[in-house]
Image (spheres, helix red, strand yellow):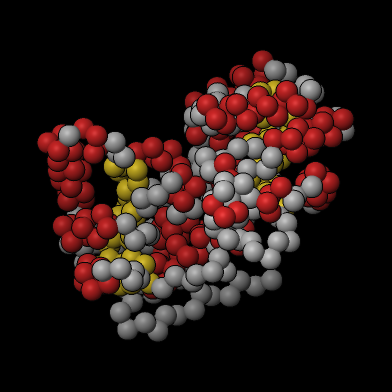
Amino acid sequence: MTNLPLPATYLPDAIDPTQLRRVLVIKLRHHGDVLLSGPVLSSLKAAAPGCEIDALVFTDTTAMLAGHPALSQLHSIGRDWKKLGPLAQLRKEWALLQTLRQRRYDLIIHLTDHPRGAWLTRLLAPRWSVAPQRAKGARWWKASFTHLYRTVGGGRRHTVDTHLDALRRLGIQPDPAARALCMEPGEEARAQVDALLAEHGLQAGDFIQLHPASRWFFKCWPAALNAQLLQQLVARGEKIVITAAPDERERQMVDAIIAAAGVPVINLAGRFNLRQLAALTTRARLFVGVDSAPMHIAAAVGTPCVALFGPSGDREWGPWMVKSEVVASDHSCRPCGQDGCGGGKVSECLYAISVQQVLGAIDRVLAA
């Protein structure tokens, strides 16, 4: 199949990417959201190879972009700066602003409607700037940027493509070869994980990784069903490594699953930081989990995925450009985006997913 050339743009206000020297991409959201912004960096680098591309994220999410091959500098904002007191926070904010000013950006790409991005754009005064359209405070927001892009609602489009619309609005057509996610664990994390796996007699490709928890528990499949899945997988001769964030609630969930299953598994819940988790996932034969940042990490490192979805939309948040299958119920109300049915923190659509459905998806992905 012949690759067709990308179409020319007909935008009267399109920019010439060859004129870009430095660009700042701002993504102030949670871990998975930040990881899904990576294709913007890759696509922009493909369009402007000589350009230096920086990113600004919250400090706790820096691991999602650290080591990205298209990234020049990674700047961060601490979520805890407000707790330091007004004077200390002002010092932090001023130091960040001075650092960013020294970079003299030609373009700022703001990927959310966070007001901080608008203020920074006004203060840094790049030649060009782009952000999503915003209903609230629309006049002030519109005046903060040279370009605004429209977002497609209703969960009809993947978040990665929504991010790439920022480039499309500038007249830069994303290169299909640069649309994949990317997360680099680093050699140190790889070595640490390999040593830990060796202690358990495991090698790359020996095991399935089960990550049953999410920071949002209304996205989680019930512990009892996870336990039944473990029983069936172990009975088939699979080796299972179970992971979770270093969070007490998640560890308690994993403990309950293992106790109910009563089968041998390797419990590494809470043992890893994000880059170590990515290193472990690169070694897994398959990732099984719910809509969560670790699921996006699996896609970013190229590990096949089986992803269970309930109230969140798989078209918008599903595994991106990796061998995968989404398992979901046929509830007419999903995806609703609610924190459980009626806001009750329990999602019936997840409880309706059977163990056999998940096993079937696992078999199909492994056989593909």
User: Residue at left 61%, top 19%?
Assistant: 195
Residue 239, quarter of the rendered image = top right
Indicate the position of residue 215 as horizontal and vertical percent values. 52, 40
Left or right, residue 31 beside residue 14: right
Q: Nearer the viewer, residue 184 or 51?
A: 184
Left or right, residue 33 beside residue 365: left
Q: Nearer the viewer, residue 39 or 344?
A: 344
User: Residue at left 16%, top 57%?
Assistant: 123
Residue 76, quarter of the rendered image = top left
Q: Is residue 42 visible?
A: no
User: Residue at left 24%, top 34%?
Assistant: 83
Residue 256, quarter of the rendered image = top right
Indicate the position of residue 197 as horizontal and vertical percent values. 66, 22
Q: Is residue 308 visible?
A: yes
- Quick check: 341 above or below 225? below
Indicate the position of residue 115 as horizontal and vertical percent values. 27, 58
* Residue furthest right as drawn: 236
Q: Nearer the viewer, residue 32 or 13?
A: 32
- Quick check: 62 above or below 70? above
User: Residue at left 34%, top 38%?
Assistant: 59
Q: Quadrant of the N terminus?
A: bottom right
